Image: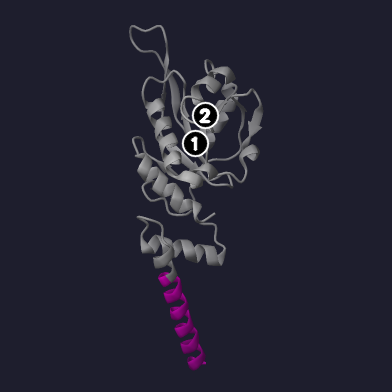
Amino acid sequence: MIRAIRYVSVLLVVLLGGIWAAAWFVRAPNESVADAFMRQLARMTGADMPAPSTGGVQLSQGVSLGGPFTLVDQTGKTVTERDFAGRPMLVYFGFTYCPDVCPTELGTIAAALDSMGPAGERVTPVFISVDPERDTPEAMADYVSRFHPRMVGLTGSAEQVAQAARAYRVYYAKVQPRDSTTYLMDHSSFIYFVGPDGRVRSLFRPESTPEAIASAVNAQLRAF
């Protein structure tokens, strides 16, 4: 019995050592060996584990973002999360009247995808409005076309937008600046990387660089 336990222990050490060595060779740029090891181990065991997000905020186990939604795209077509099934996405919530932050973050998404070359074509950039009162499908079509030819603009009714925002835990509120007749929208400003299963795998803080996002997304695409 003791001999059998020793044999199993030796085999386990050899197996884990082999996985560690493989992780060292296949790890993504800037990805630690430990993260690559966990990713390889999860793949072998079939565990549902998010890939590491170099340069982004890794979601803790048990934290779930994303989910079902019903919105309207820039062509006026009603779409749900099922229309994006199997397609990784970079998602940002904002509004077309945004004076600075939204254009900056959407430009960052576009630059990150372009820098990835063919790999970037696997990822769909998505802009979701938190200002459905003004952001009609026509307005969204004009707006997203300024950033990337493949960017999808989504809007909808106030209820539909609220549902999508809740799924992603997005904060937004209408604010009225002093000495202005036009309102603005105060909102959180994270970029979400969504896996092909519709789950958020990681998110990027405001002012993340295109290089950091591209590196993180490339690392995660290797796991799909």
Q: Residue at point 39% right, 34% down? A: 108
Relative to residue 211, is residue 64 drawn left or right? right
Asked where in the image residue 214 lies, by quadrant, the reply is top left
Residue type for callout 1: Val
Residue 187 sits in which quadrant?
Answer: top left
Mark positioned earlier in the residue sequence (1 or 2): 1
Residue 144, given in percent of the width and then of the height, sits at 50, 26
Prevailing secondary structure class for the magenta stretch in the rendered image: helix
Q: Is residue 130 visible?
A: no
Give the residue pinned by disc 1. 91
Residue type at mark 2 is Ile
Instruction: Please tell me whether residue 80 belongs to the stretch shown in magenta.
Output: no
Residue located at (36% from left, 23% from top): 100
Q: Which residue is mark 2?
A: 128
Q: Residue at x 50, y 30 (%)?
A: 127
Q: Quadrant of residue 158?
A: top right
Give, as a single range, the part of the protein colored magenta: 1-21
Relative to 143, say whether 7 is above or below. Answer: below
User: Is 14 part of what is drawn in magenta?
Assistant: yes
* Looking at the image, residue 156 lies above or below residue 52: above
- Say which element carries label 2: strand
- Where the C terminus falls, by quadrant? bottom right
Q: Position of residue 37 (x, y in %)?
A: 43, 65
From this viewpoint, is residue 19 visible? Answer: yes
Name which residue lies at 41% across and 36% down: 111
Mark 1: few, some, or many residues within 10 Å (few <14, many ≥20)? Answer: many
Residue contact between numbered discs 1 and 2, judged by CB atoms under 8 Å: yes
Task: Bin the neighbour count of mark 2 within 10 Å (Cα to Cα): few under 14, some 14-19, many 20 and up.
Answer: many
Give the answer, above or below, for where 164 lies relative to 183.
below
